[in-house]
Image (cartoon, grey):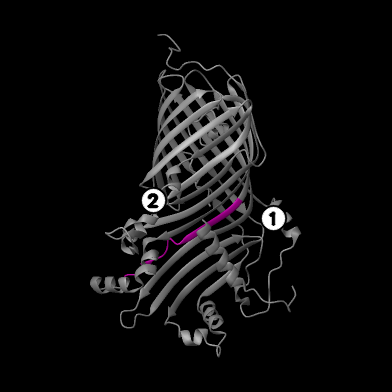
Amino acid sequence: MNPHKPKTTRLILFIGIIVFSGFLNPANAQLYNTIYWMQGIPQASYSNPALQPNPGFYLGFPGISSLYLGLNHNGFAPQDLIKKNANGNTFYIDDQAMLDKLDRNNFLSFDFQTDILGFGFRTKKDYFSFNITERVGTRFGYSRDFMRLLVDGNDYFLQQSIQQGEEIPAELGRLSLDAIHYREFGIGYSRQWNEWLNVGIRAKALQGMGNVFFEKTDLNLITRENNYELLLNADLLVNSSLLVELSPLDSIGTDSYFEIEDDDFIDYLTNRQNLGLAIDLGASFRISDKFSVAVSLVDLGLIDWKSDVENFRMRGEFEFTGIDFNDFFGSENDNSFEQLTDSILDIFDVEETTNAYRTMLPPKFFVSAAFTPGRKHRFAILGRGEYYAGTIYPSFTASYNLQVAPMLGTSVSYSVIHWNYNNVGFGLHLNLGPLQFYTVLDNFLGALRPHTIQTATVHFGLNIVTHYRKKVDPAAPSFRW
């Protein structure tokens, strides 16, 4: 390091990474609702490895065969916060309506993934597939009390304490952040065991590259009745494995900076020390000629983080009496902010270690039933659940799939996602010879009605598809008694 260059404090970078990651908003919350039964698209099997795609061979264009972007919020929609007055000509902020829409625990997430390489092929009753996928995601979890503290300040909790006759803390313990970047190497296999049963499995090796993980967040904020002072009780454990070092936090006030070389990025992208494993399982069962059910469990796995690991454990109590903004921003005392942060670090017991840690992928499960009255038509319902931070987040989808011909298939869906009812999805694949283009959206109305949006996803790509087998009309008897 060059001590003469301007200083960038590690604490500022640490907070910046947390805030930037949280509100870009991992942790792999992909919504595969509309695409679930679109078997004309090979990537539909990502939601259930047992459902074999219609083309007997596919090869994805590197980097653009499966591009996925997803934004997901189970809290409030913009229309819950920003409203029109009775005349409809002005807007106002209704923060209490926003608070009423919140659950006790909420999250905001952003996901991106792209297939670096993907292909698959069928041999009679067996189907094999392979993918290398880059995955990036963040998930910011927060409690209702956290938002209430921002909106109402500490007066709400003080009044609650007076009414209850005891101190009522603001529960901030669900404040969390998971941010992750990893590469997935997947090998899939499915088999049509007989006329009525398909089973599938996808084994995945994971190569972790970057991570921020709030392993423990026990935070309680109490307002003292006599003077409105805030007392924060904290037990916080944050793990990280990043391109830059954040430790030591007590370097605030020293002349230091972070310098990242080109080789650092190369080492980051080729890092093989943070390894993990995951598995997808699926099955489909044909009850009759027209009815079938399918179940799947995906992303059941973990990553062990061992490279460039840092752990920050903060425990203690901090009494915040306020800030004199004249001093804080005055030229006579340029070190007010550093004095405040120094006092926080001095009061709290901050332990910085480099212990390896483990993160779990948030598993997702799907249960679906389909009615296929003819070769071209399929009606389906789908229930989806995602397990994260001790809570299951559900969604439900009804869809109609039309397979006009091997070259053209569409799907229209309606979903209830985190109890938001404004999600109309659409999917399309179009084959021009062996070249296939597809796009799937779980809420295309969000672009037309952005004030209702809580979920927005787009999944599209380019494949080469060939070797379609002749479809049998499922409405025709397949066996006799």
Whether residue 271 is visible, yes or no, is: no
> Which of the two residues, 145 or 351, is positioned nearer the viewer here?
145
Question: What's the magenta region?
Answer: 168-181
Q: Marks 1/2: CA distance?
A: 39 Å
Q: Amino acid at mark 2?
A: Thr
| Residue 96 percent location from the top left of the image | 31, 63
In which quadrant will I find the N terminus?
bottom right
Report the disc number at residue 69.
Answer: none
The residue lying at 45 percent from left, 17 percent from top is 474
Residue under circle 1?
268
Residue under circle 2?
452
The residue lying at 58 percent from left, 34 percent from top is 437
- Mark found first going from the N terminus, 1 or 2: 1
Q: Residue furthest bottom?
A: 332
Q: Amino acid at mark 1?
A: Tyr
Query: Could you tell whether 383 is left or right of 259 in the image?
Result: left
Q: Residue furthest top?
A: 481
Q: Is residue 48 above or below residue 341?
A: above
Q: Quadrant of residue 396?
A: top left
Is 178 magenta? The answer is yes
Tag 1 and tag 2, C-beta contact below 8 Å: no
Q: Is residue 78 above or below residue 311?
A: above
| Residue 374 percent location from the top left of the image | 43, 19
In this view, the mark in front (1 or 2) = 2
| Residue 47 percent location from the top left of the image | 51, 36
Query: Could you tell whether 157 is left or right of 24 in the image?
Result: left
Whether residue 44 is visible, yes or no, is: yes
| Residue 245 percent location from the top left of the image | 65, 66
Query: Could you tell whether 452 is left or right of 131 in the image?
Result: left
